[in-house]
Image: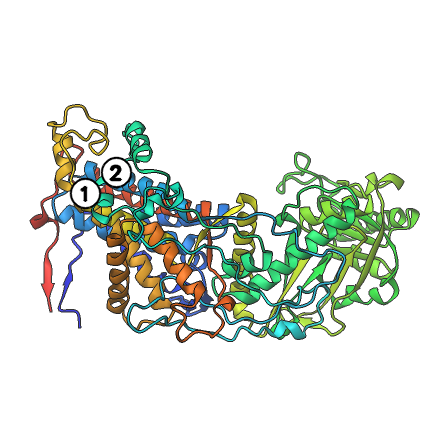
């Protein structure tokens, strides 16, 4: 029972309170175990099920200024990286509440902004020690064999933060056997057990070996805790003199030990799945199939393979069992039953193809030549019969062009005239509209076709050859609108195009399933592009929390120019205020990580309350701080997990517990965007409410309390 709650004061910092309220709605979307939400419209009483932060905010009324800023920040994160939106939303709420607490304690706004920004910069530089290089993941792929389905795994959800101190390691195992192994897949995955590589060599016990002959890699680990705490200072401010940091490194040795590299695609994919293994299997299948197609096209000429996510597409088929989800080379799309009747005569035959960039209608003119809708000529105002005659003449002309150049397949990027589709079906020709531009480009490259804007531009040189059309599934489909359709597959030799067919018996979950697939796809895309990942499972956030804990306990020396922001006059108001309020600001920043980690742990269903999760985090936090090197402590905990020291209750084979990874840049950008949004709202509220000259907030006047 909540004994007391804070009353929202509409006269002060309403924006921060609104951010916290909005962020609380998305807590269930963080972590490997996500819970969907039903959003109900109060007026129409219609409901929609959402399974991600982006879809949630799209369904909420965000008409306020703060709501619009939050929506734009989430959309910017999603549109750029397609992942990290839930992290951004939760940190926005946590840091909004933390900033409010700073204001109640009387911390000036200017010091809140500078202190939290510098603290985050310090954390970002600190977590580089937990980066795992990703190299040569395609070296062990045999591109000459057809792939088979990956073996089902029992994968841990959160390998570090679920290590309990007294009761042993408590991990929730889930049966990940995917029914997709029974599907009629065109391309499946390699059938082999995924072994977790020994990413981390066992680290030396902190403080156990004080021999001066230690290597630089382990020298920092053996520093006494007190010495480590006293020497670590906030050196990453934009006002700092970096020479101080360099001098510290030269005195005490190299940085924290780095993790070994990741060199297996299967291990990387499982580590980035974050509990969604069925979606990641499809992503891995798309990568392997694309790698196979690239290897066949290159032949003896080799060059580094890159995962081209722009050549991966999804085709959603609701109403079918999940067992039919698969990865196919080529382009899978849905056509009406009327158009599908022509496939009996066209399937498995090399066809001529024409690619139309715009619409394929009688009145279409490309941009700059479209006539105004409210202007009519005398001819256009005549009888409907004459209009029908004009379209009929145009349709006959199109058919003449297709017959002349022996074209049986037309792909159109825009819309297509229904009258033309009907006439083409009668002449055994298939016209498909609304085709993605990248699909058009892929068929142009593979078939030799040249994209044209109008049907009158078609010539022998613009017609592609060798495209085949076949049924993907022989029975009709109902994609949700009550109209029967057929799924077909278009492909040609050497095409660099992969379609992932997503099926689900529940139509309302189709959007969520597609979003989850693209989230996994972009995680793997950025991991391969950047060739590095973070240790996952909350390890990075835990390192930020423990790093800030050490910084809070360090006193600011009067002559320490680095910690005072490089100010030579240390008796100034800013320098003295920084020394006074610095621990408070850093504690508020750390509270964001604390709330993040406790939410992740609660969402893994291993702890029933946030209090238990915080107690668990605090235990490891104290151990990491006492060790003097939090990064080494984290690596040691992972090594213990891999060696079976803390594998009680999981498995007798610790090698079968894969690692968990996070992508680097999207995660860091989510942190930055979250803090930037909170500080923007803070400064805006302060200038509007208190004025630019009154940034000192008295805690007694900020809010009242209502006791229940």
Q: Residue at x 67, y 64 (%)?
A: 190
* Picture quadrant of residue 621: bottom left
Q: Is residue 452 left or right of residue 633?
A: right
Please report contact status of discs 1 and 2: CB closer than 8 Å, yes or no: yes
Which percent across, then down, holds residue 195? 56, 64
Give the image's coloring scheme: rainbow
- Quarter placement of the N terminus: bottom left
Q: Specify whether residue 72 is in view.
A: no
Q: Is residue 347 left or right of residue 93?
A: right
Which percent across, then down, holds residue 175? 51, 76
Query: Viewer-proximal residue, 457 or 632?
Result: 632
Element under disc 2: loop
* Picture quadrant of residue 303: top right
Which residue ends up furthest to the top in the rendered image?
Answer: 568
Question: Disc 1 marks which residue?
Answer: 554
Question: Disc 2 marks which residue?
Answer: 234
Element under disc 1: loop
């Amino acid at each position: 029972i909540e004994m007391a709650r804070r009353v929202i004061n509409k006269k002060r910092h309403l924006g921060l309170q609104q951010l916290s309220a909005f962020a609380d709605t998305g807590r269930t979307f963080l972590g490997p175990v996500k819970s969907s939400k039903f959003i109900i419209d109060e007026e129409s009483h219609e409901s929609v099920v959402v399974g991600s932060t982006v879809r949630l905010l799209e369904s909420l009324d965000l008409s306020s200024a703060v709501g619009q800023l939050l929506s734009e920040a989430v959309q910017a994160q999603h549109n750029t990286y397609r992942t990290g939106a839930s992290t951004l939303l939760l940190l926005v709420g946590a840091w909004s509440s933390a900033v409010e607490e700073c204001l109640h304690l009387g911390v000036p706004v200017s010091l809140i902004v500078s202190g939290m920004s510098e603290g985050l910069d310090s954390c970002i530089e600190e977590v580089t020690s937990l980066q795992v290089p990703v190299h040569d993941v395609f070296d062990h792929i045999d591109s000459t064999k057809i792939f088979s389905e990956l073996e089902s795994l029992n994968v841990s959800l959160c390998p570090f933060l679920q290590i309990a101190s007294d009761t042993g390691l408590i991990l929730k195992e889930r049966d990940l056997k995917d029914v997709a192994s029974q599907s009629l897949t065109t391309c499946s995955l390699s059938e082999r057990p995924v072994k977790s590589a020994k990413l981390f060599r066992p680290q030396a016990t902190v403080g156990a070996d004080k021999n001066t002959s230690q290597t630089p890699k382990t020298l920092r680990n053996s520093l006494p805790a007190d010495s480590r705490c006293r020497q670590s200072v906030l050196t990453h401010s934009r006002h700092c003199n970096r020479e101080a940091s360099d001098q510290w490194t030269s005195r005490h040795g190299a940085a924290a030990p780095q993790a070994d590299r990741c060199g297996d695609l299967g291990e990387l994919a499982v580590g980035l799945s974050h509990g969604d293994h069925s979606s990641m299997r499809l992503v891995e299948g798309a990568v392997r199939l694309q790698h196979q197609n690239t290897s066949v096209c290159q032949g003896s000429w080799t060059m580094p393979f890159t995962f081209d996510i722009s050549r991966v597409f999804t085709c959603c088929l609701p109403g079918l069992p999940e067992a039919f989800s698969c990865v196919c080379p080529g382009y899978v799309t849905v056509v009406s039953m009327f158009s599908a009747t022509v496939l009996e005569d066209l399937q498995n035959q090399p066809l001529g193809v024409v690619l139309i960039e715009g619409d394929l209608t009688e009145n279409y003119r490309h941009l700059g030549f479209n006539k105004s809708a409210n202007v009519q000529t005398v001819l256009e105002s005549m009888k409907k019969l004459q209009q029908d005659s004009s379209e009929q003449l145009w349709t006959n002309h199109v058919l003449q062009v297709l017959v002349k150049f022996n074209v049986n397949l037309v792909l159109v990027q825009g819309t297509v005239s229904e009258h033309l589709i009907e006439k083409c079906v009668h002449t055994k020709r298939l016209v498909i509209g609304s085709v993605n531009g990248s699909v058009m480009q892929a068929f142009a490259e593979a078939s030799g076709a040249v994209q044209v804007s109008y049907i009158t531009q078609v010539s022998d040189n613009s017609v592609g050859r060798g495209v085949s059309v076949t049924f993907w599934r022989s029975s009709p489909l109902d994609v949700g609108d009550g109209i029967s359709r057929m799924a077909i597959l278009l492909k040609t030799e050497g095409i660099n195009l992969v379609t992932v067919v997503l099926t689900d018996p529940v139509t309302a979950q189709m959007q969520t399933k597609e979003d989850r697939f693209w989230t996994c796809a972009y995680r793997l895309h950025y991991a391969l592009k950047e060739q590095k990942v973070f240790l996952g499972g909350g390890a990075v956030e835990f390192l930020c929390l423990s790093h800030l804990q050490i910084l809070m306990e360090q006193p600011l020396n009067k002559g320490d120019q680095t910690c005072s922001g490089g100010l030579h006059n240390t008796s100034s108001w800013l320098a003295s205020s920084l020394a006074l309020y610095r621990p408070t600001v850093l504690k508020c920043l750390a509270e964001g990580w604390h709330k993040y980690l406790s939410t992740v742990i609660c969402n893994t269903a291993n702890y029933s309350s946030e209090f238990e999760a915080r107690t668990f985090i605090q235990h490891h936090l104290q151990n990491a701080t006492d060790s003097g090197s939090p990064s080494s402590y984290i690596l040691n905990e992972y090594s213990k997990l891999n060696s079976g020291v803390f594998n009680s209750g999981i498995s007798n084979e610790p090698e079968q517990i894969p690692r968990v990874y996070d992508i680097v840049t999207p995660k860091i950008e989510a942190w930055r965007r979250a803090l930037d949004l909170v500080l923007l709202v803070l400064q805006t509220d302060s200038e509007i409410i208190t004025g630019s000259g009154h940034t000192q907030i008295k805690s007694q006047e900020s809010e009242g309390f209502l006791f229940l």
